[in-house]
Every structure is written in C-alpha cells, then in structure tokens.
Amino acid sequence: MTLLAPARPTVLPSAPPRRKRNKQWIGALYAAPTAFVVGMFFVVPLALVVWMSLHHWPLLGAPTLNAPENYAGLGEDELLRTAVWFTLKYTVVVTVLLFALSFGLALMVQHRGRGVGLLRTAFFLPAAVGFASASLLFLGLLSDEIGPVNDLLAGDGYLSLTSGSPNTALGSAVVLVLWRFAGFNMLILLTGLQAIPLDVYEAARLDGATRWQIFRRITVPLMRPTIALVLTLMITGSLLAFDQFWILTRGGPDNSTTSLVMVIYREAFIELDLGSAAAISVVLLGVLIVFNAIQLGVLRRRSQ
C-alpha cells in the first residue's frame, strides 16, 4: 500500500518591495495637495505668529528681538485683565444658555410628525445668515433711532437693551448668539439623538423606566461624544468672540464688553504693536489646546 505524502501548504508570494514603495509614493502624492494647503495656511502662519511674539514688531518699521518682554508685560495690562474676566463670564453664560436651548430644540423635533420638518427648517434658518450680517441686523433692531425693539420694551416697562449698561450690552450680544447658533447646534445634537437605536428606548419602557430615567440613563450617556463636540464648539467660539461685540458695542461702555480678540485687534491695528498682539494670540491658542486636550481625555476615559 502506497502512502501519499501530505500536501504542502500553498504560500502566496508576497508583494515585491518595489511595488510597496510605489503604493507609498502614490499615497504621498494624493496627500501632497492637502499637506501643502495645511502647511502654507496653518503651519507657516502659526510659526510666524510665534516668531512675531518674540519681537517688538511695529506695523510700520523694522522688528527687534525683545523676548520675553511681550509675554512678561501681559500681566501688567489692565485692559487685558478686564477682557479675560469678561470673556470668561460671557463664555459661561453663552455655553449654559445655548446648550440648554439647543438641546431642548433637538428633543422637541426629535421624532417625525406633522409640522416637525417645518420647525426644523425654521430653527435652522438663522444659521444661514452670516454672523456679521446678523450682528448688523440686531444693531438696527436695537437702535434707539430706527429700531422697534427698545420702543416695545420701554412701552411694556422693561429696560432697554441698549441703555448703556454693561449687563444690557452683554444681554443683547447673548440674545444675538442664541438666535444665530441655536439652530446649528440643534442640528448636531439631533444627529446624535437619531443615532440612538429605538430598541434601547423600547426595552427601557418595557422595564418600567420613566421619561426622566430614560433621558438620564440612556440619552445622555449615549450622547456624550456629540455633547462633547457641541460644547467644544460653543466654548471655543465664545473665547474667540469678536464680531458681535465689535459691531454692537465697540467694547463699551467703558471697555466692559471688550473681549480677548478685541484686545488683540487693538494691539495690532490701533496701538500698531504686532508683537504684543501675537503674544496674546499664542497664549490664547495654548489655552484652547489645553482645554481641548483635557476634554478629549475626559471623553475617552468615560467612553471606556
């Protein structure tokens, strides 16, 4: 009896190293345009800003190295301290109110029904208006000469939104931001809500869970990535606020509504000191990077 030898396993030939190198070069060529754009419009300007922050750099004149005077002088700038405190207060107020309003609108239009599509469109429409245009629109509405809003409020016994008080000036900017961005953030939150499987809600109802328990135990935990994204956009946008205050209040009254970006603008184009403006920009960028890193770290820890 003849025994057959066991069949040898078939070994597929590996791709030649030359073909792998060709694929790598092809991938690099595809990525080259994007890398060029990012380098020219982000990396190079960022490096230039850091270099400017180490110099006394007048708008018209030759720069001279003065490191680290631009950074050391930030703590002595009274206007900068006022702007930091105001920006933090504005960020907290806007983030809390805008998130609550956006989440409420998203929950309102979460399920399909009669008129829901119309409500979604109506809530999102302000996001189609440019922010500078929206600020000019509110400036006209709140104007004492041509705007109807202050006359209506005065007739009802309320305070004017442009009465010159710091709180009313801040209130007008907050109302503008809520009107302009609530629909945009609603759309992001609505996307997260609709990604939650309906089976999870049905199982919770069968187990006797109340609406509040479903919201707290199911909706919020499954919405964490979406909520983190929305909060990051809100806080970053609030820390970089400029248009609404420059158009509505010009930083007044008495610099009470001057934001950090307005200080950067004044240092660069009114005081003509680009070095000091660049130093403030670098510090602000560092704060944003640290904040985003902490938030992403917390999100990853909770997701595990």
Image: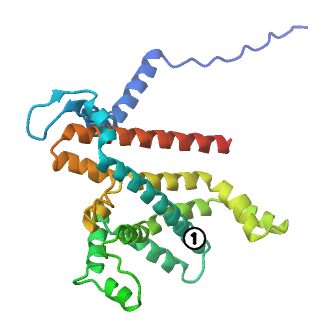
280 and 122: which is toward the camera: 280
> Looking at the image, is 117 positioned above or below residue 14?
below
Q: Is residue 289 left or right of residue 205?
A: left
- Camera sees residue 36: no
Q: Name above or below for residue 110 compared with residue 251.
A: below
Which residue has dot 1 on it? Answer: 104
Residue 273 position, x and y percent, is 18, 41
* Crowd class of label 1 (few under 14; some 14 to 19; many from 20; radius 10 Å): some
Q: Which quarter of the rendering shows the C terminus?
A: top right
Give how far across and how far down residue 236 sits, in percent.
42, 51
Nearest the viewer among 156 and 37 is 156
Q: Quadrant of residue 163?
A: bottom left
Return the residue found at the far left.
Answer: 61
- Residue type at mark 1 is Gly
Query: Which quadrant is home to the N terminus?
Result: top right
Residue visible at 12% across and 41% down in the picture? 59
Rendered image coloring scheme: rainbow
